[in-house]
Amino acid sequence: MLYQRSSALFQEAQRVIPGGVNSPVRAFKSVGGTPIFVERAEGAYLFDADGNRLIDYINSWGPMILGHTHPAVIKAVCDRARLGTSFGMPTQLETRIAELAISMIPGADKIRMVNSGTEACMSAVRLARGYTGRDKIIKFAGCYHGHSDSFLIQAGSGAMTFGTPNSPGVTRGTAQDTLLARYNDMENVEQLCRANSGAIAAIIIEPVAGNMGCIPPAEGFLEGLRTICDREGILLIFDEVMTGFRLARGGAQELFGVRADIATFGKVIGGGLPVGAFAARSEIMDHLAPLGPVYQAGTLSGNPLAMAAGYAMLQELDKDPNIYKRLDEKTSYLKSGMEKCLAEAGIDHTINRVGSMISVHFDREPVTDFTTAARGDNQRFRDFFHGLLAAGIYIAPSAYETWFITDALTYEDLDLTIAAVEKVAAQL
């Protein structure tokens, strides 16, 4: 495939946008080469500036569960746009989508709309601190909760130390209130809780990690976190920006049968438009302004375009209970096909999958946390990525990102993908 137009557009963009992109992973730094500039999308496909058609396995990083430009979502957005795009005032539509979302989210009484997953997680942590009167939080290495200062933290020198900033601009004072734990390591969490007894407001986690590849929680891990939080008076926050409404109607909470105190959501709840939300039971949510003292606000929160798209998306998911079965079956089919190809080529690999989230790691050992994810052969992943791209298959341009499957994918698309993996594997 030729990408001359994308290359020219990238050069043009670099003159006026830092790095030529408005979000770093788009720059292809992890895999090398030139980012693909998209012209349009439909169903399971992207169409780039050079006229190439690509089978899409990132789906706007998760929200396109129904596929791109789904008729119900597009109609809802167009109909709302004709009535006005933003008011900064309440609309009935906000209540309608809140009612529908709460009916789907386990344990939630109220929900607050924001403008991104980052804002949702940032606000959830602030709410947890205000509710508990405590300052510290525990997050897990390799989990990404947006680019708020509290979350841009790397490991200290040992299990008992505080984290340190991993981005300039994040103060050490901010880092002192963030404790870093190892994903799937219950004893490590227990150690942090013992060393900071009575000081921890919240544990925030991706119940299925999606930012070190797809990494499932170990058996009993989420249940163990729930037990610790109940014992210590800590709020458990599930970051369901990726998993919410994707893994099940009620997200990871429904899939694993573990209740979070606060759940955060992102693009899915806006049908792919910029949006986020956080939800909890009333006693927690009523600490938010204007009812309570914890301040959170946003001029465009609950904007009518995102609410219209999200309401249409959630209605489609709500009325089609078989969609999760179809997504699971398609992703399982893809996993089996890729495993066969890579095994026959003699390539060390591990493929992790939960529902319609999946990732390929070029290492034969189990991938269960950030340390094991980092062991993978990144050069082999780069070759794998570019080989698939040349065959018209677009996967996440990083070994540390999950793929997302859409219901719009056909089995013909999956077979084309598996055939491409077989061809690429023979050359790795």
Image (tube, grey):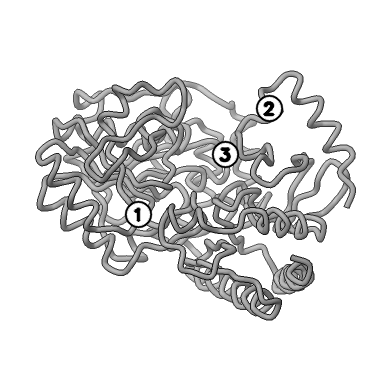
Three-letter code for the amino acid on which mark 1 is drawn: Tyr
Q: Residue 273 carries which label?
A: 3
Three-letter code for the amino acid on which mark 3 is drawn: Leu
Q: Circle 2: is it few (<14), some (14-19), or many (20+) Cα within 10 Å?
A: some
Residue under the image location 72 percent in, 43 percent down: 32
Q: Which mark is residue 183?
A: 1
Task: Report x, y in % for residue 98.
Answer: 38, 43
Residue under the image location 20 percent in, 44 percent down: 235
In screen coordinates, is 158 left or right of 408?
left
Residue under the image location 25 percent in, 31 percent down: 177
Q: Circle 1: is it few (<14), some (14-19), or many (20+) Cα within 10 Å?
A: many
The residue labelled by disc 2 is 19
In screen coordinates, is 419 left or right of 378?
right
In screen coordinates, is 162 left or right of 338?
left
Q: Nearer the viewer, residue 218 or 413?
A: 218
Is residue 186 placed above or below 21 in the rendered structure? below
- Answer with the quarter of the image where residue 346 lies: bottom right
Q: Do the residues labelled 3 and 2 touch (CB within 8 Å)?
A: no
